[in-house]
Image: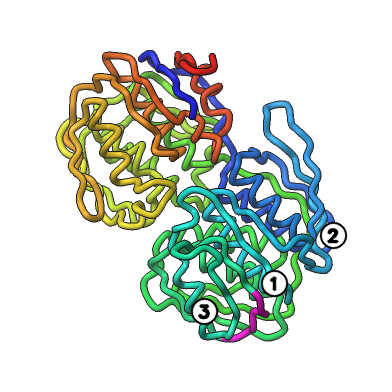
C-alpha cells in the first residue's frame, strides 16, 4: 500500500482529459471480435484496460501496443477468427466491466472456462447471469464457496428471448449485446424493470454500430438483435472521459481556472451531466471548440439523482461539501457494490477531513462547510475515492495523508503526474515521490 502526504495547493492549468474507460472497453472488445485488423487509438492502459485486452487475447485476439507521445497507446487488434479459447482461465483482475462483458462472449465457444478476479470483484452481484444460465441450461459452478469468483462456465449461448432486470447493472445487458448478434438465430433482450445507467447502453450501441453491428433499441425496454451478423474491423479513436474529467471540472469550480481538453458535449457518456450539475450549483463553466473551461465559483447545494451517473458521487460529495447549504444525493443504492461501498467510503473519508455528511440507505446528505481541515484517510482501494481526496485537498487548511494512493492505477495510472502538473504537491511517505 502506498501512503502519500498532500500539501494543499490551488490547481490550475490546461489538461488533456484521459480517454474514456467505458468507450475503450467496448472498442477493444468489438475489435477483438472483428474479422480482420482494427486500430484503436488514444487508449490509457490502466489495470482495467489491461484486463480486457488480456481477456480478448485469451479468446484468440492478437493485440500489439504502440505508445503515443502523451503516454496513451495505439492498439492494433487482429480479431478472434475464429473465437477459440487459448487458456482455460481468464482473469478480470478487479474490472467489473471486463467480467460482465466477457462471460456471454466466452459462451460463444463450447470449451469450459474459469473466470477469476480480485478484491471486491469476487463478491460483485452476478444474479442476472445465473438466472439466464439456469433458464438456458448453461452449466456454471462456483469454485470457492461463498464467492461468485472463480466461476466455471461451460455451454453454448442460444439465440432467443432473454429477460433481464434493467436495474442491477447495464453491464449484463452490454455483455449480451456483444454476443447475441453472432448467433445463428435472432434474439431479443427484454427488460423486466426500468433501465438504469441508460447512457452506458447508448455508448455500447454507438460503438457496436461503428463496428458494423446493428441493434434496434425499442424504447429502452427491448433490444431487437438480428443473428448472423459480423463485426467489421476499422479505425477508432477513443474520446475523452467525462468520468475522469469530472474531477478536474470540480477542481476548477472550487479552486482556480481549469481548461479541460477533449471533452465533447455531443458524447453519449452519461457522466457529461457533470457539466449541467456544476451549472445548477452556480458554477461558471463554458464550452469551447476543444473542451470545457471552469472558473472559480460560489456554488450552492442541490438535490442530485445519481441513478444514471453513479460514478460521479465521490467528486460531487467534495463539491457539495464546499457549497453553501445542503446537497442531497439520491438513488445511489448500487454504489454499495462498487470497488468499495462507495456511499460509506465517501462519507467516511470526507467526514474525517472535516466534512459534514450523513449517509442514507440510497445516498448522502451533505451539509456545506467553509473548507476541509486535512487529516489521515484511506482510499478504501477505490480509485474514485483516492482522486476525490486529491481534489478535496485544494480547499484544506492542513496536510492530508492518504493510504492506498495507488488505487488510481485501476483507471487513471497517470493521475498523480497530472495532479502535479496542475500545481498539486505531494510526497511519498514510504517510497518517495
Q: Which is more foreground, mark 3 or mark 1?
A: 1
User: Vertically, is 32 above or below 8?
Assistant: below
Point out the stretch of residues depicted in magenta: 154-160
Q: Which is more foreground, mark 3 or mark 2?
A: 3
User: Which colour assignment does the render follow?
Assistant: rainbow
Q: CA distance from mark 3 to mark 1?
A: 17 Å
Main secondary structure found in the magenta portion? loop
- Residue 384: within the magenta? no
User: Vertically, is 256 above or below 93?
Assistant: above
* Label 2 residue SS: loop
Q: CA distance from mark 3 to mark 2?
A: 31 Å
Rendered location of residue 188, percent (x, y): 55, 81
Looking at the image, is mark 2 or mark 1 earlier in the sequence? 2
**C-beta proximity under 8 Å, tags 3 and 2:** no
In the displayed structure, does residue 116 sit left or right of residue 285? right
- Image quarter (top left, top right, bottom left or bottom right) of the C terminus: top right
Residue at horizontal 52 percent and vertical 68 percent from the top: 173
Query: Is any part of residue 290 visible from this angle?
Result: no
* Label 3 residue SS: helix
Residue at horizontal 79 percent and vertical 51 percent from the top: 77
* Label 1 residue SS: loop
Residue at horizontal 46 percent and vertical 38 percent from the top: 383
Q: How many marks?
A: 3
Q: Which residue is mark 2?
A: 36
Q: CA distance from mark 2 to mark 1?
A: 26 Å
Q: Which residue is mark 3?
A: 132
Q: Which residue is mark 1?
A: 112
Rendered location of residue 203, percent (x, y): 55, 57
- Residue 155: within the magenta? yes
Nearest the eye: 79 or 248 = 79
Looking at the image, is mark 3 or mark 2 earlier in the sequence? 2
Amino acid at each position: 500500500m502506498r501512503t502519500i502526504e498532500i500539501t494543499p495547493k490551488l490547481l490550475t492549468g490546461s489538461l488533456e482529459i484521459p480517454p474514456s474507460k467505458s468507450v475503450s472497453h467496448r472498442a477493444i472488445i468489438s475489435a477483438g471480435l472483428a474479422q480482420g485488423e482494427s486500430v484503436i487509438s488514444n487508449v490509457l492502459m490502466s489495470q482495467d484496460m489491461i484486463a480486457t485486452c488480456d481477456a480478448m487475447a485469451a479468446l484468440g485476439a492478437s493485440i500489439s501496443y504502440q505508445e503515443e507521445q502523451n503516454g496513451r497507446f495505439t492498439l492494433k487488434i487482429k480479431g478472434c477468427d475464429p473465437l477459440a479459447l487459448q487458456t482455460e482461465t481468464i482473469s478480470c483482475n478487479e474490472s467489473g466491466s471486463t467480467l460482465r462483458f466477457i462471460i456471454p462472449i466466452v459462451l460463444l465457444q463450447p470449451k469450459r472456462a474459469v473466470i477469476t478476479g480480485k478484491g471486491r470483484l469476487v463478491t460483485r452481484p452476478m444474479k442476472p447471469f445465473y438466472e439466464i444460465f439456469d433458464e438456458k441450461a448453461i452449466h456454471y459452478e462456483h469454485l470457492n464457496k461463498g464467492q461468485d469468483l472463480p466461476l466455471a462456465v461451460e455451454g453454448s449461448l442460444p439465440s432467443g428471448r432473454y429477460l433481464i432486470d434493467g436495474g442491477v447493472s447495464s453491464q449484463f445487458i452490454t455483455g449480451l449485446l456483444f454476443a447475441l448478434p453472432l448467433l445463428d438465430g435472432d434474439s431479443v433482450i427484454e427488460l423486466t424493470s426500468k433501465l438504469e445507467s441508460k447512457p452506458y447502453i447508448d455508448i455500447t450501441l454507438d460503438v457496436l454500430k461503428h463496428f458494423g453491428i446493428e441493434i434496434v433499441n425499442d424504447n429502452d425496454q427491448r433490444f431487437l438483435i438480428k443473428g448472423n451478423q459480423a463485426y467489421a474491423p476499422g479505425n477508432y479513436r477513443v474520446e475523452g472521459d467525462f468520468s475522469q474529467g469530472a474531477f478536474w471540472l470540480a477542481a476548477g469550480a472550487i479552486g482556480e481556472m481549469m481548461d479541460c481538453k477533449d471533452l465533447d458535449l455531443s458524447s453519449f457518456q452519461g457522466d457529461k451531466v457533470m457539466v449541467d450539475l456544476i451549472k445548477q450549483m452556480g458554477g461558471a463553466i463554458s464550452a469551447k471548440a476543444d473542451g470545457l473551461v471552469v472558473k472559480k465559483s460560489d456554488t450552492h447545494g442541490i438535490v442530485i439523482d445519481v441513478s444514471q451517473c453513479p460514478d460521479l458521487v465521490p467528486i460531487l460529495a467534495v463539491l457539495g461539501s464546499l457549497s453553501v447549504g445542503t446537497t442531497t444525493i439520491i438513488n445511489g443504492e448500487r454504489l454499495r457494490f462498487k470497488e468499495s461501498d462507495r456511499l460509506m467510503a465517501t462519507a467516511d473519508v470526507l467526514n474525517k477531513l472535516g466534512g459534514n455528511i450523513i449517509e442514507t440507505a440510497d445516498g448522502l446528505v451533505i451539509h456545506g462547510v467553509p473548507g476541509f481541515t486535512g487529516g489521515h484517510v484511506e482510499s478504501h482501494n477505490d480509485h474514485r475515492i483516492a482522486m476525490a481526496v486529491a481534489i478535496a485537498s485544494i480547499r484544506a487548511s492542513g496536510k492530508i495523508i492518504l493510504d492506498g494512493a495507488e488505487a488510481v492505477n485501476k483507471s487513471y495510472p497517470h493521475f498523480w503526474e497530472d495532479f502535479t502538473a496542475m500545481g498539486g504537491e505531494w510526497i511519498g511517505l514510504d517510497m518517495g515521490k
